[in-house]
Amino acid sequence: MDKFELIFIPSPGLSHLIATVEATKLLLDRDPRLSVTVLTMQLPNDTAVDAYTTNFSASPRLTFSALPALPPHSKASIFYLIDSQITNVRDAIDQRRRDHRIAGIVVDMFCLKFVDVALEFCFPAYCFFTSGASTLGLFQYVLSLKFNEKKELSEFINSDEELPVPCFSLPVPAKVLPAAFVAGGPIADHFLNLLRRIPEMDGVVVNTFHEFESYAIDSMAGKNPRIYPVGPILDLTGVSKEDDVKRWLDDQPEKSVVFLCFGTNGSFSGEQVKEIALALENSGCRFLWSLRKPMSVEGKKMVVEYEDFGEVLPEGFLERTKGVGRVIGWVGQVGVLSHRAVGGFVSHCGWNSTLESVWFGVPMATFPLYAEQQLNAFYLVKELGMAEMIRLDYKTDFRGEEDEVEIVGAGEIEGAIRRLMTAEGGGVRVKVEEMGRKGRAALEIGGSSYKAQAMFIEDVIRNVVSDVIEFLDQQPRKSVVFLCFGSLGSFTEAQIKEQAAALESTGGRFLWSLRRGKQRYFSTPVESILPEGFLERTKGVGKVIVGWAPQAAVLAHPAVGGFVSHCGWNSILESMWCGVPMAAWPLYAEQQINAFQMVAEVGVAVEVKVDYREESGVVVRSEEIAAAIERLMEGEKGVRERAEEMREKSSGAVVDGGSLRKFLARLVRDIMDNASA
C-alpha cells in the first residue's frame, strides 16, 4: 500500500495549531495511507505551543517539528515572524522529503508566503482556512475590489453602502467588513497581498460544513481553487472537566444560565464593563461571565486576569448578584457550552466560538469585536436567523491603538439577553439545535464533511500522480525507461550529470525520479545540478521528477518498458508483478545480492554495475549507463520475455490454487497444530 505524507504549517500561536491538529486527526482517521508532519512556530516568550506538543498523545502517523524560535522579548510582528521562517521551512521540508513521499504542503491562511517553498520542490500547495466559507468568499470579493476594480477600501469606513458579495444571499453592509481592511496600513496591505496567493492553491480546506454555509459553498463550486468543507473542526477536550465552575453550573436549572465570553483576546473598557454588568443585573437572568482585563504595553494590546473584579464592576454588583451569577477569569469555553445549565451565549462571534455554539446547540447574542467577527455576526443574525443581535458592527481595536471606542448601552444588551433566554430563545434556539444535529451528522459516515475529507485525500493523491501519468499517457507502449532508486536512494552531483548524459545520448524516452543526496545541493534549482540545457533538449522526450515518484503506478503503465532500479526487494516484486525488466544498479544493504540474483539467476535484469556501493565514491560513466539502458530497452538476453513470464507466474500465485494460497494454507495449519499440541 502506497503511503503519503502531508506537511501542515499553522500560523504561530496555540489557537491555529489546535485547529490544525484537530483537522489532521480527522484526515488520519479517514485513510491509513496518510501521515502528517506539523511544523510549529511560536511567538517570543510563548511556551504554550511547546507545552501542547509535549503533552500531546503520541501517534506514529502524526509528527511535530518545531521551527527555530525568535529571540525572547522580540517585538517582531506575526507576519515578520512568519516571513523569517522561510529558510527554516525550506530546510524542514527538504529534510522530510528524503525519507517520506510528500503529497503536498498545507499552509495556514496567514502562512501563504510558504507557497513559494512548495513550488520550489514541485509539491502541490493547499490552504487550511480556519474561518468559514462565507469569510473566504468575502476575502475574494474584497481582493477583486482592490486589485481588479482599483477601489480604495478606505471609502467604506463608516459607509452605509451595501455590497453584492457573491457568497451571501443578502447584500452585505460595508460596516461589517473587517476593520483592518478598510482602515488600511502596512499590516492590512501585507495580509491582502498574501490572500492574493489563494487562487494559486491546489485546494482550500475550510473549517465548516455544507449544511451551515450551503449558499457560500455552492457559490464557489466548480471554481478554482476547489474548496473542501471538512468541519466542524473542534477541540472538545475539557467537556467533562471537574472544577469549581462546573460544580456551580451543576446547581443551576437546565438552560437557565447565559454565558458571556469573548475569546482569548476579548476585553472591554471599564465603562463598557459597567454597562454589561447593569444589563445582567436588570435582566434577572442567571449568568456566568468570563471577564478579563485589557492592557496596553508599548502600543500592543494584551489581555490579563483581574486581581480584583471590584476594581471594574459597579459597586455592590457582586453582592447583589450572589447566587444568581458568577464572574470569573479565563475558563474552558467548551466545558461551559456543553453543560446542560447553559441556555445562551453572549459572544464575540469568533469562528471557533460560533462552531462550538452550534455544536452544543446554544444560541448566541452577537457582540463582535475585531477581525471577521462582524461578518460572522451578520451571517448568523441576518442570513440564518440563528442569533440575537446586540450589535453587528461594533468594533474594538485589536491592536489597542484607538483611544475612543463606542459604548453599547445596558438597555441594548439587556434586551438581547432577555430575547435570547426566553423559552424558545426568540425562535433562534430551535434553529441552532437543529444545525448542531446537522453538524454532527456531517462528520458521520456518509455525511457531507465525511465525503469532503475523502475527496480531499483522493485529490491529494491524484495530484501527486496525475502529471506523471499524463506524461506517460502521451508515450508509445513500452517506450519509456523509468529510473527510480527507492526512498533513500540518491547520488552525488557528479553521478547525476553522468546519468543525464547517458539518458540524452540514448535518445530514448525516460522518466527520472531524481532525489537529493547527503550534499545540500537541491536547495538550488535542479537545473543547476543537471548539465546545462538538459531539460530543454530533452523536453517532450523525458521528464524529471524532483523527489518521490508513484513507483507502483508508473510500473503498471503500458508506456513503461524498462526500470533502472536499486534492486530493493519491494521494487523487484513490483517490477515482476508488472512484467517490467530491470537494469540493476544496487546501492546498499542486501541490494547487491538481489541484483546478482536478478541478472545471473532469474534473468529478468541487465547489469549497470551489480557491485556498486553508495559509499564507494565510484562514478559510473555515462557510456556504461547508456549501454545498459540500450540493452534493457532492446530486451537483450530475453529479459523482457522472462519478466513477462514472471508477471504471469506472480499473478497465478495469488489466485485460488496458486503457490501463495497454498503456502498460506500450510502456515495456518501449522499454527493451529502448534496451538493445539
Image: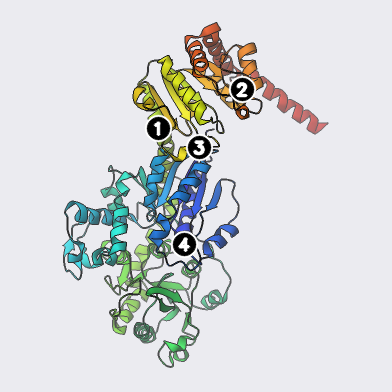
User: Does the image show residue 219?
Assistant: yes
The label shown at residue 527 is 1
The x, y position of residue 468, in whole percent, is 40, 28
Left or right, 257 with respect to 149, comes to right
Most extreme residue toward the bottom is: 316
Q: What's under tag 1, amino acid-wise?
A: Glu
Earlier along the polypeptide chain: callout 1 or callout 4?
4
What residue sits right under mark 3 in the picture?
A: 101
Left or right, 268 with respect to 177, comes to right
Q: Residues within 10 Å of mark 3 (few under 14, many from 20)?
A: many
Q: Residues within 10 Å of mark 1 (few under 14, many from 20)?
A: few
Task: Kindly indicate whether the residue at mark 4 contacts the one at mark 3 (C-beta within 8 angstroms).
Answer: no
What residue sits right under mark 2 in the picture?
A: 612
CA–CA distance in space, label 2 to label 4: 49 Å
Task: Kindly indicate whether the residue at mark 4 contacts the one at mark 2 (C-beta within 8 angstroms).
Answer: no
Earlier along the polypeptide chain: callout 3 or callout 4?
4
The label shown at residue 262 is none
The x, y position of residue 134, in whole percent, is 30, 56
The label shown at residue 13 is 4
